[in-house]
Image (spheres, rainbow, N blue to C red):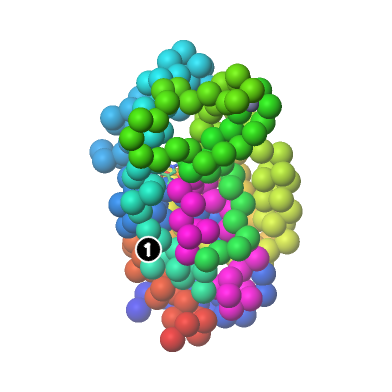
Amino acid sequence: MSDALEQAARVLHGATSIVAVTGAGISVESNIPAFRGPKGLWTKYPPEEYATIEGFLEDLAKVWRLWYELGDLLADSAPNPAHYALAQLEQAGKLDAIITQNVDNLHQAAGNQHVIEYHGNGKRMVCLECGAQQPIPEGPDRPLPPRCVCGGLIKPDVVMFGELIPQDALTESEHLAIQCDVMLVVGTSAEVYPAAQVPHTAKYAGAYIIEVNPEHTAFTSTITDAFLQGPAGHMLPALLAQAGVTR
Ligand code: NAD
Ligand code: ZN
């Protein structure tokens, strides 16, 4: 076993307030591709066309077609052992919250109660006029684009480039980062701001940073205290077992 795993497990065992920050990497083993890299969605769908608010407003039907396709992908996906490990950590009374950049709803599906949706939820849509939220429709014959009963434009309830992070998610994340004694940073590239700021805030406030990722990131050599190199679906269950949270 690696020294990093042993040390991280010791710290986790003694911790009282743990907060997890998760990114697209934790869902890769649930067959949802990350955005960056050769298999990433951005290679197929240029972000300036599909993930900016300007691109969305320019061609509603085109962007909605992608979101319906993603919706089908999300409907077919299920939590993997990494999501379940975080659910067990919460059930054990050790995990205060998950701050997730993901929009796939898999932490909630795994049973986590306290999930902060930093970038929204890809199973929901919201009216830009009246603010009404509803589930994104599934199945055939979906309207392109969908319209609200009030006549307003409807957008997937996700944060696109050029939009602000929901204020309550920002405030609560900062509060959690300041008060936690361990932050678990799982499957995030450290390239998307302001989400990437959260682990920096925790570190600055004195937290021990455990990072889980098969690749090095901008966190690894700067703020990470224990780097668990490998897929989250393997590393998180191993960490919990070693820390005595699970057997
Ligand atoms: P990213 O795509 O920029 O980076 C993914 C990270 O995950 C990389 O560092 C990669 O090395 C790592 N990774 C790959 N496989 C892994 C595994 N098995 N276990 C652990 N880590 C693994 O993702 P990001 O930093 O989260 O930023 C992209 C933005 O797009 C975020 O807002 C993200 O939530 C969103 N997004 C969400 C989903 C989803 O909801 N599942 C999917 C794609 C992108
Ligand atoms: Zn409306």
User: Where's the C terminus, which quadrant?
Assistant: bottom left
Q: Residue at x 32, y 57 (%)?
A: 29
Instruction: Assign a secondary structure to mark 1.
Output: loop
Q: Which residue is painted at 73% across and 53% down in the image?
A: 175
Instruction: Name the spot of residue 139 as percent of width and height, x first.
Output: 36, 39
- Above or below, 217 relative to 9: above
Q: Quadrant of the N terminus?
A: bottom left
Residue 150 lies in quadrant: top right
The kind of residue tagged 1 is Asn
- Is residue 51 in the magenta section? no
Foreground: 174 or 122? Answer: 122
The percent position of residue 42, horizontal first and vertical second, equals 34, 32
At x 67%, y 69%, the residue is 17
Residue 176 appears at what percent x and percent y? 69, 57
Tell whether 41 sits left or right of 161: left
The quarter of the picture where residue 142 lies is: top left
Q: Is residue 166 above or below residue 182?
A: above
Is residue 128 something that shows in the picture?
Answer: no
Q: Residue furthest top?
A: 58
Q: Which residues are magenta?
A: 89-110
Residue 118 x/y as whole percent: 59, 44
With respect to residue 171, does 16 lie above or below? below
- Crowd tier of the residue under label 1, counting other residues whose Cα lies within 10 Å: few below 14, some 14–19, many 20 or above: many
| Count of labels in the image | 1
Q: Which residue is mark 1?
A: 80
Front residue of 148/245: it is: 148
Left or right: where 151 falls relative to 42 = right
